[in-house]
Image (tube, rainbow, N blue to C red):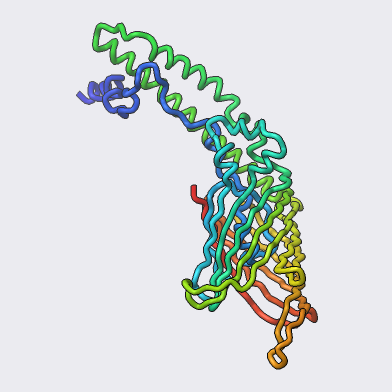
Amino acid sequence: MLERLLSFLKTPALVLALAPAAGFSQIPGQLPATLPQGAEYRYTEFAIPVSPALSLLNADPSMVGMPSVVRDFKVDWSFKTYRLTPNLCLEANPVWSFLYDRPQNSYAAYQRAGWLMRRLSSTNLSIGTIAQDTTRELAWAVKINLFSQKDFYATKAVFQIGNQDIQPMRDTLAAQLQRLLDSPDTAQTDGGKFERAYKIFNLNQQLESMDMQIRDRSNFLRGIFMRRFWNSASLDLAFGKTFLYQGERIDSLQLRQQGFGVWLTGGFGLGDSWFVSGMIKNVMFNEKEFSFFRGINIRYGSVKFNFFGEMVLQNDQRRQTNFLTGERSLKNDAHVQIGYGGSFRIGTNLLLSFGLRTDYDRNLSFRSLLPVANLSCLMR
């Protein structure tokens, strides 16, 4: 009896009976749904930088950010003050989303695009706010990538190397399945019908297995690419506008000051674990008042996490009022800001970055200490 039971368990009939319904609910003439070609290569940002609007407001844990392109909708929560009130910033990349985000064709349209359109596809738009005790700051900014040493989506070979040996076999199986689905079911007996259904089921299973192998290989290659080139050279240009409002209540704010800022951020890698970046930024409030920044940042780590140290020189020229005489005059002030901190990537969607910023005067006398933390969330 036991031997007969084991023999029955090995028969195709029982396999068919216990098989998932999806294997036999195939519409005649239609192949099973497969993984869209290129979908496994998404989420390949070398870095997830803080939104440019927060950078314009100096609410970035590292004032000299790491240049990179974000191709998804993103939300930033920044904690710049000693209070727990978060400051919010929204960021989007409309050109990439509407024109080139097509994983089903392996981003062929982007690979055919010229230099100008590729640069425009890196355009990030952002708007953010910062709340102080009695002031509110609002900023919008636009950032565009001028140069990327390694462009994952433009590297066509990366999309082919992962499945170059499996794809021909998959195409052959898919053709066999299509011929079987297109052929009429002429079986007259139950055994013949079950045999045809079992062949369809078996081909479906083989196709799913190959799709899984392609996906696993592609994810592995993507990981190698990101780890190897996370510190490749890049250059970003950004500009935006800031608004400073005075008022203790949100419904009674008065505009006190506004300014226009433009800045350039670029960097290059040293070896496999170092990245050196620099920044130059100017924010003009009117014809005579401005803030001018120059800084350098050194990072050590990987695409998963890194630590940094930076130094930023800041020159301010602002009008100040003499409280005794009431006279207003221009005053120049120089700062030396030294910061250190790091960032930790949580999966493919979240980045936690933190920094401790110390401020000194032109004589390197300590003036203030400011902790800054930021949580960036990509809305996949």
- Looking at the image, how many numbered discs can be counted on the residues? 0
Residue at 76% from the left image edge and 78% from the top image edge: 333
Q: Quadrant of residue 275?
A: bottom right
Residue closest to the eye, 163 or 67? 67
Quadrant of the snapshot with the N terminus: top left
Residue at 67% from the left image edge and 68% from the top image edge: 340
Residue closest to the eye, 151 or 159? 151
Q: Estimate the x, y position of residue 106 in percent, counting from the top left.
A: 58, 32
Q: Is residue 316 left or right of residue 15?
A: right
For the view shown, which residue lies furthest in the left direction? 1
Note whether residue 328 is visible. yes
Q: Estimate the x, y position of residue 39 in percent, counting from the top left.
A: 52, 36
For the view shown, which residue lies furthest in the right direction? 363
Residue at 60% from the left image edge and 26% from the top image edge: 164
Note whether residue 347 is visible. no
Vertical placement of residue 157 versus 299, above or below: above
Q: Quadrant of residue 66?
A: bottom right
Vertical placement of residue 233 versus 184, above or below: below
Q: Estimate the x, y position of residue 332 in percent, counting from the top left.
A: 78, 78
